[in-house]
Image: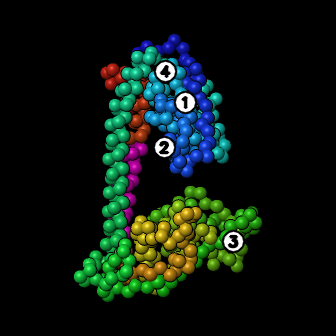
Amino acid sequence: MIRSAQSIALKRLISLRSGSSTDSQSGNGNIPVMGATGIIGTTSQSNCDVGSSLIGRVGTVGQVNYVTQSCWAADNVIVATPKGIDSRYAYFLLSGIHLPGLASSTAQPLLTAAAIGSVRVDVPTLEEQRRIAAFLDAEISRWDELARVRTGHWAALDEYEMASIADTLSGSATMSNGRPTGWQWLPVVPADWRIGPVYAYFEAQLGKMLNSDRAAGFDQAPYLRNANVHWYQLDCSDMATMSFPPEERYRYRVEPGDLLVCEGGAGVAEAAVWDGRVEPCYFQKSLHRVRRNADVPVEWLMYWLRLAKYCGVFEADGNVATIPHLTGEQLRRYRIPIPPDGERRVARLSREVEQLSELRGRIAQADALTAERKQALIVAAVTGQFDVTTGRGADLS
């Protein structure tokens, strides 16, 4: 492989500039508005040609996207236009550099054209650039096809999970032997099941409102907020504190077995059971704390919420034009099916859900390994560690 005699600054090989904001992202026109992750709108004009690469400068810092059609490059990207080198090779060259490592180490990392342009690289002849680009295009298409297959696996697992939840919540009843509910998304339950409002079986309460005085006051204690709650699990790696004086501790404390339900935002209705890993622990107003006051486990309501959200129930009831919310009044008044043997049904369903979670974890590990090897292949090819004419030279294992 023929390389340049000395390294060259990227700014001599690639023109680097920031994208621009546009007021025409409301669907007018057929020119895509592009960010580093893809299309984010449309407009009636373009500021970027085919063959450029878009690099995330804020948010998705360092992510690189190749431009295959004229577009408008948004102001959150850097436009990288090759000058004198092959455009696909330039894309792979940029992809092979650890661009996030060039960003400013601030609360909001920022990547600049100057930082990218100062990187020095060795560049082969134009003929070799094209060979490398063609090789990587062919190889990475295989990796991407594998990723698409795994995406199908994710969708199949989601469908299986929802089917299992629906079968459990409906008691496997049919129209011939069941009781109609009037709900299109869960039309039938066994004839001997009760149907009643959430408030008849559970106690639901919102948490404490956060303000600047409470965030800095006395009696600080950790609390859970919307960001800590996901379906079936709680993330306590980033917990904040605020003031909970003695007279409020009983009211806002969470106990093992409590169900925490997100009140609003993109994660509206997401729910998980508190396991007591942090003691004492409290909860913010962005969450509902649900406790059982009858013979129905809180997990039964958690799975009902999971299926209801999947079926769009909260989108219909919430104000989706802004931010959807599940208010305390709404939550308490929803009617749910109540089986006579909820504990047994929840235990069986929870085992299935846990097995599905384990499968998802394995797929996620495989996806991460695929991404690592794809990146290693790109780096090896553009740095000359890998002879693309023979497919030998780099250990990617």
Residue on which disc 2 sits? 30
Q: Which mark is residue 80?
A: 1
Prevailing secondary structure class for the magenta stretch in the rendered image: helix
Q: How is the image coloured?
A: rainbow
Left-right relation of 196 to 98 = left
> Closer to the camera, 366 or 314?
314
- Disc 3 residue type? Phe
The reply to whether the magenta stretch includes residue 210 is no
Q: Amino acid at mark 4?
A: Ile
For the N terminus, give its image quadrant: top left
Q: How far apart, in angstroms, are the residues tagged by discs 4 and 3?
A: 62 Å
Label 1, label 2: how many angstroms apart (C-alpha)?
23 Å
Split into 4 quadrants, where in the image is the C terminus?
Answer: top left
Pick whichever of labels 4 and 1 is earlier in the sequence. Answer: 1
Q: Find residue 85 and name its label.
A: 4
Work out how far the residue at label 3 is from the one at label 2, CA to CA, in angstroms.
Answer: 54 Å
